[in-house]
Image (tube, grey):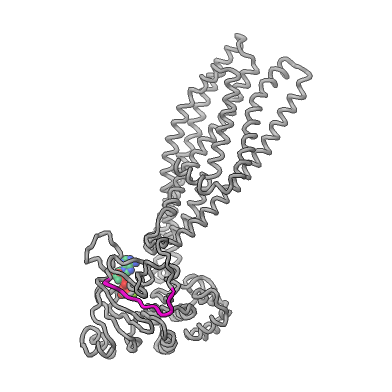
């Protein structure tokens, strides 16, 4: 119930007017159904048995009007309800998407992208059934049922009371069924999610699948996931449709009783045939909405199962909350400082030093400086950039820009000051132009080309069939690793931000292109605050300061010359590098 209330409150409101119309037509449809049951009596008693001539045509016309009106009203009601349902689905999808974009990186690490897609498409659609169809259908059928019951009581109240002894049984059964279905629905949606996630991973990793000859294994795993969805769907059907036989038997029993009792009553003259038939017609017609109510309850429960999952996401609050910070970062020459920063990705284990990815890291990067991070993989270099970007917040200590904690700035203004070339280059399935322009969507084509030239990418782009308009495929599948990296660098150059974050930005390039890009990067670094993670030591000799990271700590720091003179980790790394 709170779930339904929430759907009504948050999503139904804009459609109140249309909803009122829909209910209006629904009431007409229900009234016409009851009216017909009532008309059975005059049809039998006045037209057939007592043969009142002047009533024949009016009664026949009433029956016709009754049906026509019901048809039109039902049509209007159905169309309107469906329109509302579809609109609500799209509203929820938009909300869900916008909300997910606000969530932390951590959320996306824990929820595979395929599963998110399934939630946005499959769950929301299942929800539609609960939202509009079920909610309004419940109304309509309830109303029809009640009106028919009124007709029954009008015809013979003793009989009506007797007939309704089956009601509590039917209701209890429907409730039990609903509970089961809701559980099954939750599990179905969950398994659709993991199936989607599995499929999208296989398609994304199709090169690996083929190269390692894993087709058979992937087929087996796909079959498992697919069959699981099938089994749950079958279970949904076998359970949900139980309502039909159970109801039929209960109704059959009642009709049996009615005919026997009514027959004797009629013979005794206590009941006209018309009244009895009208009663039975009303009862049988009441049976339709009753059946529908049971079915709708199933849909409702299934939909609520999906709604729970959808709202679970809508209810997640990003841990990196932006609403508290109202200050906008405005800095042409930002100074970044780490002050005794400790960090762990997984804080569940408490303050266990073993989990620490960063341990008491302090350094300052002034404007115009290039801070280079070196060290073995897993040392925590990329993590430092993650904290600067505020993808995560430190466990203790703080990261500041121009002396203030970055948590005091709005995320938008903070990230607006940064250009990132990440370790895993992300290329969208779009044109080369759009991919570079992602760095600054307001930039014109000439600025994009300028940036591409600086990133040494112009030539290979022009060599492609459609130049800047070439679509590069998902994850830039049509590009080589080095080409992808150059597009990412062009994107960062175009952004023209005062803080430059480079994470092994040139690792996929050959020596020659790297040398060329290095030149343009060095030009770019002028007047900015740069943190660069280098995989080749040759590229950082000119850095203002080199921080040697080891297991989350800064082990050494200084200029290239100072560190060589120190004769520590860096010196031995460099000797290995120079001779290897
Ligand atoms: N998103 C993440 N979630 C959990 N652990 C992570 C995540 N990213 C990195 N780690 C762990 O943190 C440590 C440091 O990683 P990272 O900063 O990427 O190292 P580097 O860039 O120096 O190679 C590694 O042990 C890695 O396993
Ligand atoms: Mg890294």
- Image quadrant where residue 288 sits: top right
The residue under the point 43% across, 59% down is 197
> Is there any visible trace of residue 141 in the rendered image?
yes
Number of numbered labels in the structure image: 0
Q: Is residue 497 above or below residue 145?
A: below
Whole-percent x and y of residue 277? 63, 20
Look at the image and say whether residue 182 sits in the magenta stretch.
no
The residue under the point 45% across, 49% down is 230
Q: Nearer the viewer, residue 16 or 211?
A: 16
Q: Which residues are magenta?
A: 330-340
Q: Nearer the viewer, residue 337 or 288?
A: 337
- Quadrant where the N terminus sits is top left
The residue under the point 63% across, 45% down is 79
Look at the image and say whether residue 336 sits in the magenta stretch.
yes
- Image quadrant where residue 514 sits: bottom left
Whole-percent x and y of residue 172? 44, 31
Whole-percent x and y of residue 393? 33, 66
For residue 531, side relative to residue 100 (left or right): left
């Amino acid at each position: 119930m709170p779930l339904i209330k929430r759907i009504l409150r948050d999503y139904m409101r804009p459609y109140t007017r249309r909803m009122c119309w829909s209910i209006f037509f629904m009431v007409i449809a229900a009234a016409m159904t009851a009216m017909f049951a009532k008309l059975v009596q005059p049809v039998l008693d006045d037209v057939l048995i007592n043969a009142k001539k002047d009533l024949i045509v009016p009664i026949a016309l009433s029956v016709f009007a009754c049906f026509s009106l019901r048809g039109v009203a039902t049509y209007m009601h159905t169309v309107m309800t469906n329109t509302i349902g579809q609109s609500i689905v799209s509203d929820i999808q938009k909300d869900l998407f916008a909300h997910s974009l606000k969530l932390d990186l951590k959320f996306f690490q824990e929820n595979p992208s395929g599963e998110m897609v399934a939630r946005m498409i499959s769950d929301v659609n299942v929800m539609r059934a609960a939202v509009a169809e079920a909610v309004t259908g419940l109304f309509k059928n309830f109303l029809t049922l009640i009106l028919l019951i009124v007709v029954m009581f009008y015809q013979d109240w003793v009989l009506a009371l007797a007939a309704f002894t089956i009601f509590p049984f039917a209701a209890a059964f429907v409730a039990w069924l609903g509970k089961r279905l809701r559980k099954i629905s939750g599990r179905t949606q969950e398994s659709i999610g993991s199936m989607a996630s599995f499929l999208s991973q296989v398609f994304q990793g199709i090169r690996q699948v083929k190269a390692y000859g894993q087709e058979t294994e992937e087929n087996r795993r796909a079959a498992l996931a697919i069959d699981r969805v099938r089994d749950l769907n079958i279970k949904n059907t076998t359970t949900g449709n139980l309502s039909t036989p159970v109801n039929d038997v209960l109704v059959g029993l009642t009709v049996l009783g009615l005919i026997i009792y009514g027959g004797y009553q009629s013979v005794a003259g206590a009941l006209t045939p018309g009244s009895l038939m009208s009663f039975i017609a009303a009862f049988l017609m009441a049976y339709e909405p009753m059946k529908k109510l049971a079915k709708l309850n199933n849909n409702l429960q299934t939909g609520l199962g999906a709604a729970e999952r959808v709202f679970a996401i809508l209810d997640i609050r990003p841990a990196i909350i932006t609403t508290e910070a109202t200050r906008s970062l405005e800095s042409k020459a930002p100074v970044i400082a780490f002050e005794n920063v400790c960090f762990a990705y997984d804080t569940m284990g408490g303050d266990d030093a073993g989990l620490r990815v960063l341990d008491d890291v302090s350094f300052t990067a002034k404007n115009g400086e290039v801070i280079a991070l070196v060290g073995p993989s897993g040392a925590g270099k990329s993590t430092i950039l993650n904290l600067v970007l505020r993808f995560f917040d430190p466990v203790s200590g703080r990261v500041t820009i121009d002396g203030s904690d970055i948590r005091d700035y709005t995320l938008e203004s903070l990230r607006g000051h940064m250009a990132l070339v990440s370790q895993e280059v992300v290329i969208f399935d779009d044109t080369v132009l759009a991919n570079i322009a992602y760095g600054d969507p307001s930039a014109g084509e000439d600025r994009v080309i300028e940036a591409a030239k600086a990133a040494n990418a112009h030539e290979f782009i022009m060599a492609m069939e459609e130049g800047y308009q070439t679509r590069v495929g998902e994850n830039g599948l049509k590009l080589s690793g080095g080409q992808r990296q150059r597009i990412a660098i062009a994107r960062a150059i175009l952004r023209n931000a005062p803080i430059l974050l480079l994470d092994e930005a040139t690792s996929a390039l050959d020596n020659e292109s790297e040398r060329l890009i290095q030149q343009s990067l060095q030009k770019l670094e002028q007047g900015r605050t740069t943190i660069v993670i280098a995989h080749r030591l040759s590229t950082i000799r000119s850095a203002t300061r080199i921080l040697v990271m080891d297991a989350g700590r800064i082990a050494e720091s200084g200029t290239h010359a100072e560190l060589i003179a120190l004769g520590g980790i860096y010196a031995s790394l460099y000797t290995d590098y120079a001779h290897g």
